[in-house]
Amino acid sequence: MRLTGRLGAAPEMKELENEKKVAKISLATHYYRKNGKGETVEETHWHQLVLWNQQADIAEKYLNKGSQIAIEGRLANRFYTDKDGEKHYVTEVVVNELMLLGKKE
């Protein structure tokens, strides 16, 4: 899967016990289509990205809200149970290639 878009917020960083780093990022992509009246309509889609180790370091150092990036990765599904015992299902993109676009923010 390849996506190009802008970050909705600065990366959320975590360091795990085994000295691994993980960055979580929300990426907005835009899709343009014509509606029934022939007008152009913009749709924004949000994707949750996960970056590990060296890519997490790059994200922490260079990415901010609004940064434009291109990524390639794979979809990963997981679930968790919240404090009320309700299950939540999450689909994330685990990034294996990251390209910084535009100027440094």
Image (cartoon, grey):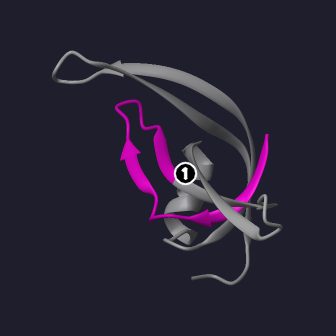
Specify whether residue 11 is painted magenta.
yes
State the image quarter where residue 33 is shown: bottom right
| Numbered range of the magenta stretch | 1-25
- In terms of depth relative to the viewer, which is nearer, 28 or 23? 28
Task: Residue at 47%, 37% (x, y): give it.
Answer: 20
75 with respect to 88 (left or right): right
Specify whether residue 14 is painted magenta.
yes
Task: Residue at 40%, 54% (x, y): give it.
Answer: 12
Rendered position, 60 above or below 23: below
The secondary structure type at the circle numbered 1 is helix
- In terms of depth relative to the viewer, which is nearer, 5 or 16? 5
- In terms of depth relative to the viewer, which is nearer, 8 or 22? 8
Q: Quadrant of the C terminus?
A: bottom right
Rendered position, 23 above or below 103: above
Where residue 72 sits: x, y (%)?
77, 45
Rendered position, 84 above or below 38: above
State the image quarter where residue 10 is shown: bottom left
Q: Residues within 10 Å of mark 1 (few under 14, many from 20)?
A: many
Task: Residue at 34%, 31% (x, y): give it.
Answer: 17
82 with respect to 21 (left or right): left
Give the amino acid type for the residue marked by disc 1 in the picture.
Ala
State the image quarter where residue 94 is shown: top right
Rendered position, 105 above or below 89: below
Task: Residue at 55%, 74% (x, y): give it.
Answer: 66
The residue to which callout 1 is attached is 56
Q: Residue furthest front?
A: 37
